[in-house]
Image (cartoon, grey):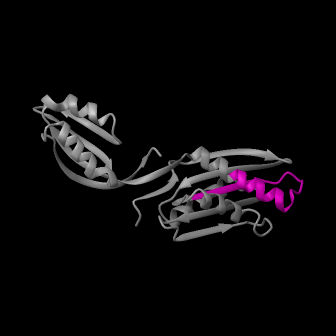
Amino acid sequence: MTDQYITVKARGTDEFTVSKSRFIGYACPCASENDAVSFIHEIREMHRDAKHHCYAYIIGQNSGIMRYSDDGEPGGTAGLPILEVMRSQQIVNCCVVVVRYFGGILLGTGGLVRAYTQGCKIALQAASVVRMEKTLHYLCDVPYSVWDSFLHAAESLPVHVLNPEFAVSVSFTLAVRAHDAESILDTLSSVTSRKLDYIQSDETFEPWEV
């Protein structure tokens, strides 16, 4: 398992029209193949009257599962272009469905490839592509005397200071990327004169700025 992967932050949709055909792109984060299949069924139900519901999905941080469908379009003109856009951006744990309402004008092989490529791109953009990184959470505690020093240092570091509580001392949760944890904790311990107490609570994957 890798320490990071690229996916979409949330569901997103966008659409465009070319030669009277309406293309609607949908993207959704999916943790499993069952999630992807359910999403495809959902979009098909939503657009029962559409002629084509072409899709691709990639599941697993190492792209272990990849599937696509042209759903009646000429072979290689719809599902595969969608998949190739996702692969080019290294996106995983995601499903993209591009719905086509046929406008009566044939687009040709090249036109279809371009249209489904665009449908995927705008769906991914609407869903917000993010890098998910392995993140460690620490339950922390510092005395008031070093709280300002801690905050000043934290503002310049890639950390998230969560849920501060002010009682006898200041307690909070510190979220830090796994590969940064050792050096950042050492820095924060130093600026607080080694008065920062912490213990790891859990480990998750969360979005971080690239």
Work out which residue is located at the far left of the displayed protein and give it: 168
Q: Give the residues in magenta.
A: 95-119
Q: In the rendered structure, does residue 56 fall within the stretch colored magenta?
A: no
115 inside magenta stretch: yes
Identify the image quadrant of the N terminus. Answer: bottom left
Quarter where residue 95 is shown? bottom right
Residue occupying image coordinates x 77% and y 70%: 75
List x then y, in percent, for residue 38. Answer: 56, 61
Q: Left of 208 or right of it: where is 120?
A: right
Q: Which residue is drawn at 17% across and 36% down?
A: 192
Q: At x 23% / y 48%, what residue is drawn?
A: 138
Using the image as rendered, state which of residue 113 and residue 196 is in the foreground: 196
* Left or right, 23 with reference to 208: right
Whether residue 117 is visible, yes or no, is yes
* 108 shown above or below 142: below
Quick check: can you spot residue 49?
Answer: no
In the displayed structure, would residue 16 be above or below residue 1?
above
